[in-house]
Structure formats: structure tokens, C-alpha cells
Image (cartoon, rainbow, N blue to C red):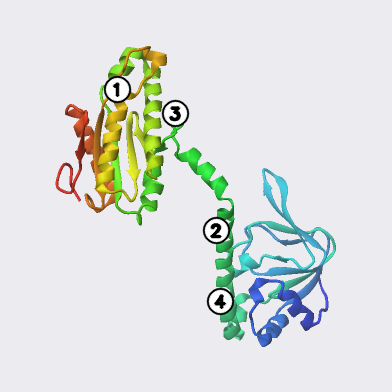
């Protein structure tokens, strides 16, 4: 590394390659140019190493630089920078560490800010006004990087949806799993009140499995899922598999009349479910234990109301089944 001469006006031009210096006053830029060095780096010289404190950033005036990471003693090039590019300004802005190592690919002229051996602290002490404006630019850069990341996620939303679906979908039935309610649905429906919660458990399901085997039970669960998925689709809601043969519907913007109609539809559909591949012509005649509630009318906390509705369903099932019970603020398991 050898210092070389570069007019201050040219240094200002190169500094403006970084968003760090945009919108600063001309006098600010000139002063900053006096605190900037220009150096001739030889091929294979290291500008900085991963993990080192980001005390400087670099603008390539001429030449090129490779940024690489090292894993299992193997160097992998992550990016290559050429004339006009800036390295390390984001790390410098948020006062972090360099996240990779930078090596000079060919003899290069590189602008260094601040110049060796000037430190950030010295800049602050000498010109606190300019340093304050630089701090504001740092915040702006970090905010812009965050927004850019959010936009990237948004642009790749189809990929995100695929991954989310794989993570939250019960593979055997196609229903959402319970954690999807806890982590996603409960947030999505906050502004879509009132929200209906319907928990369902088939009666005498064990008899089906004992008589025809667990594969018959799996087939019946698949048919149950189709009924619930159709209802959820029609009513712009979600169908969930809580566990085993216990399921639920969550329907946003649902009236009490609509809720009762859905419960009646479920009660009518279950006895019609068949699994002829296992039972032949014998009807399995399933019935349903159902508990239902309406949020926030029946409970102020959505997730707790879901648990109360589930407990109500279990109570119905344990006490004869084949009926629906409304879980209100005043009945079973109300501990809100």
C-alpha cells in the first residue's frame, strides 16, 4: 500500500459514490475529502478481514476487489467490485464488523475514509456538526437497507408462501396445523371481527378404527377434511387439524346466523361420509361433537377463547356427543 496524490475535488466525486455522503453540504464534503486518503494497493493485498471492526470504508478509483468468505478452509468469492464501487460503507455506518474478507485482485487505486490513522472519534471531536449529519445519514442507510430487505421478501412472496404452506400444512389431510392459528391466523383476523371458532370431534371414531383398521380411520379423516375445507373456502376462513381426529374452523367476519348454519352443515355432512374402500357398502354413520364461539362477544382473548372452545368440544364428546354447544362468557371453563 502506497499513498498517491488525488485532487480534493476528485475525492469528493468519488465519496459521492456512497449513499453515506449524499445530501451533505458542499463545505461538509470538502472537509471530509481532507480526511480521506488515496492509496495504491498491490495485487493480493488484504483491505480488511471478516470480523474486524469496520473502522474504514473504501471506494475503488481504479482496479478491482474480491470479497470472499471462508468455510472449511475453502475460500468462496461472494462478490467482485470494480471502479466506482464502494465497500464496507454499510458496516461502517452501523459501527459493526466486516462480514467478509476483501482482497485486491489487481494493482488498484482505492480511496479510504477516514484516512489512516484518523478515527471516528477524532472526526467527532473536530467537527461535531458534520459528524451529527453523518450519523443521520447512517440511520437513513440502515433504514433503507431494512426496507430493501422487506421489499426483497415481498417480491419473493410466492416462495415464502410455498415454504409457509409446507411448514403449516398437515400432509395427511391438507388442513392447516394448530400452530398456524397461533402464529398466523390469530394476527390476521384482528381487524376482521366477529370471528367464529368451531371445534369438531367425530363420535365413535375409535370404533371405526377398531373394526376396519387405522387406514380406514385415515381415509375417514381425509373425507372429513374435504368437508371442512369446502366450508372454509365458501366462508373465507381456515380449516385446522388440532390433533388426531380433532379439527376446527376459524371464520372471520361471521354473523351468529352464519355460525349456526355452518354448525348445522357439519352435523348434516358427517353421517354422509363414507370410506367404501374399507367398509364396503356398510355406512359408518359418523356424528360430530361440536363447540362453537364468537370472538370477541364470547371472550376478549382470541387464543384463550379457542382453548375454551376446544375444552367445550371435549365436554360434549365425553357426554354423549352428537350435538353442538355454544361457549359463551358465562359457561364452561371461563377463566378470563
Whether pointer 1 and pointer 4 mark residues with C-beta atoms closer than 8 Å, the reply is no
Q: Is residue 313 left or right of residue 99?
A: left
Q: Which mark's residue is nearer the viewer, 1 or 2?
A: 1
The residue closer to the viewer here, 332 or 18, is 332
Residue visible at 15% across and 44% down?
331
Q: Does label 2 or label 3 sit earlier along the sequence? A: 2
Residue topped by disc 4: 136
Q: Quadrant of residue 290?
A: top left
Q: Which residue is mark 3?
A: 172
Residue furthest toward the bottom? 27
Residue 180: image quadrant is: top left
Residue 140, how many percent across, how many down? 57, 71
* Gap in angstroms between the C-alphas marked 1 and 2: 46 Å
| Mark 2 and mark 3 residues within 8 Å of each other at the beta carbon | no
Q: Disc 4 or 3, which lies upstream in sequence?
A: 4
**Nearer the camera: disc 2 or disc 4:** 2
Report, in whole angstroms, how far the alpha carbon at label 1 lies from the one at label 3: 17 Å
Spatial distance from mark 4 to mark 3, Cα to Cα? Answer: 53 Å
Left or right of 22: which side holds 325?
A: left
Rendered position, 126 above or below 76? below
Is disc 4 placed on a helix, strand or loop? helix
| Label 3 secondary element | loop
CA–CA distance in space, label 2 to label 3: 33 Å
Nearest the camera: 40 or 184? 184
Judge by depth and name the residue closer to the eye, 240 or 47: 240
Q: Secondary structure at mark 1?
A: helix
Q: In x, y percent, where is residue 70?
A: 68, 49
Residue 125 image offset from top left, x and y in percent: 58, 83
Mark 2, Cα crowd under 10 Å, few <14 / some 14-19 / many 20+, is few
Q: Is residue 179 visible?
A: no
Amino acid at each position: 500500500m502506497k499513498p498517491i496524490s488525488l485532487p480534493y475535488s476528485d475525492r469528493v466525486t468519488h465519496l459521492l459514490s456512497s449513499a453515506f455522503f449524499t445530501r451533505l453540504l458542499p463545505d461538509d464534503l470538502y472537509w471530509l475529502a481532507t480526511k480521506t486518503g488515496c492509496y495504491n494497493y498491490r495485487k493480493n493485498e488484504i483491505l480488511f478481514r471478516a470480523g474486524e471492526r469496520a473502522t474504514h470504508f473504501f471506494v475503488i478509483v481504479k482496479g478491482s476487489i474480491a470479497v470472499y468468505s471462508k468455510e472449511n478452509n475453502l475460500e468462496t468469492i461472494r462478490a467482485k467490485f470494480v471502479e466506482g464501487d464502494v465497500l464496507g460503507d454499510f458496516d461502517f455506518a452501523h459501527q459493526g464488523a466486516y462480514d467478509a474478507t476483501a482482497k485486491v485482485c489487481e494493482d488498484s487505486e482505492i480511496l479510504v475514509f477516514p484516512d489512516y490513522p484518523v478515527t471516528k472519534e477524532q472526526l467527532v471531536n473536530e467537527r461535531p456538526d458534520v459528524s451529527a449529519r453523518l450519523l443521520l445519514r447512517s440511520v437513513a442507510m440502515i433504514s433503507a437497507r431494512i426496507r430493501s430487505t422487506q421489499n426483497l421478501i415481498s417480491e419473493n412472496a410466492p416462495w415464502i408462501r410455498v415454504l409457509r404452506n409446507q411448514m403449516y400444512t398437515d400432509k395427511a389431510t391438507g388442513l392447516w396445523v394448530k400452530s398456524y392459528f397461533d402464529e398466523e391466523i390469530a394476527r390476521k383476523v384482528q381487524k376482521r371481527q366477529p370471528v367464529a371458532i368451531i371445534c369438531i370431534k367425530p363420535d365413535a371414531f375409535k370404533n371405526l378404527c377398531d373394526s376396519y383398521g387405522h387406514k380406514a380411520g385415515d381415509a375417514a379423516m381425509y373425507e372429513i377434511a374435504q368437508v371442512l375445507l369446502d366450508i372454509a373456502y365458501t366462508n373465507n376462513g381456515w380449516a385446522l387439524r388440532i390433533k388426531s381426529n380433532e379439527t376446527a374452523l376459524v371464520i372471520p367476519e361471521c354473523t351468529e346466523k352464519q355460525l349456526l348454519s355452518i354448525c348445522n352443515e357439519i352435523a348434516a355432512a358427517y353421517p354422509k361420509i363414507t370410506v367404501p374402500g374399507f367398509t364396503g357398502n356398510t355406512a359408518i354413520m359418523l356424528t360430530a361433537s361440536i363447540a362453537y364461539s364468537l370472538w370477541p362477544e364470547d371472550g376478549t382473548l382470541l387464543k384463550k377463547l379457542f382453548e375454551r372452545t376446544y375444552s367445550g368440544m371435549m365436554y360434549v364428546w365425553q357426554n354423549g356427543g352428537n350435538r353442538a354447544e355454544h361457549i359463551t362468557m358465562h359457561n364452561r371453563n371461563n377463566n378470563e
